[in-house]
């Protein structure tokens, strides 16, 4: 088997969101974002402006999270809707 990147489990995803309850604060969520394989080459997570709705978010051009700054009070559903709307706008569909 080649040592290249393993097959993606979400090959059609442009952005992947993982949310989990904060281990120390029951009312907060840890959100992690990563660019997926279907993301256009020019797209970065910075271009989505995640910090506008989650000031605790930080990271690289292709991956980031809000854990270090304490997470968010946004529910995973509300967070996903924000990311989706910004992705649509960045892709010129929103």
Image: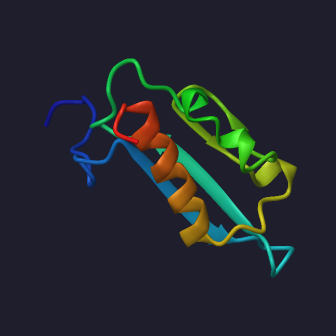
Q: Position of residue 18 (x, y in %)?
A: 53, 60
Give the camera-side residue of 29 and 89. Answer: 89
**82 horizontally vs 27: left or right:** left
Give the residue displayed 21% in from the left and 44% down from the top. Answer: 7
Quarter placement of the N terminus: top left
Give the residue displayed 37% in from the left and 31% down from the top. Answer: 92
User: In this rendering, is residue 71 above or below 48?
Assistant: below
Residue furthest out toward the bottom: 26
Q: What sort of colour scheme is used for the picture?
A: rainbow
- The image quadrant of residue 71 is bottom right
Residue furthest out toward the front: 94
Q: Position of residue 16 (x, y in %)?
A: 43, 51
- The image quadrant of residue 51 is top right
Residue furthest out toward the left: 1
Q: Position of residue 64 (x, y in %)?
A: 63, 40
Q: Position of residue 38 (x, y in %)?
A: 27, 37
**63 horizontally vs 3: left or right:** right
Quarter placement of the C terminus: top left
Tag count:
0
Q: Is residue 35 visible?
A: no
Give the camera-side residue of 25 and 55. Answer: 55
**94 horizontally vs 11: left or right:** right
Q: Is residue 20 visible?
A: yes
Give the residue displayed 60% in from the left and 61% down from the top. Answer: 79
Give the residue displayed 24% in from the left and 29% down from the top. Answer: 4
């Amino acid at each position: 088997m080649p040592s290249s990147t393993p097959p993606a489990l979400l090959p059609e995803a442009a952005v992947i969101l993982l949310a989990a309850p904060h281990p120390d604060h029951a009312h907060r969520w840890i959100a992690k974002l990563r660019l997926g394989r279907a993301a256009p080459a020019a797209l970065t997570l910075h271009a989505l402006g995640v910090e506008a709705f989650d000031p605790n978010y930080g990271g690289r051009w292709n991956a980031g999270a809000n854990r270090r700054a304490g997470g968010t009070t946004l529910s995973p559903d509300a967070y996903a809707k924000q990311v989706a709307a910004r992705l649509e706008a960045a892709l010129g569909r929103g």
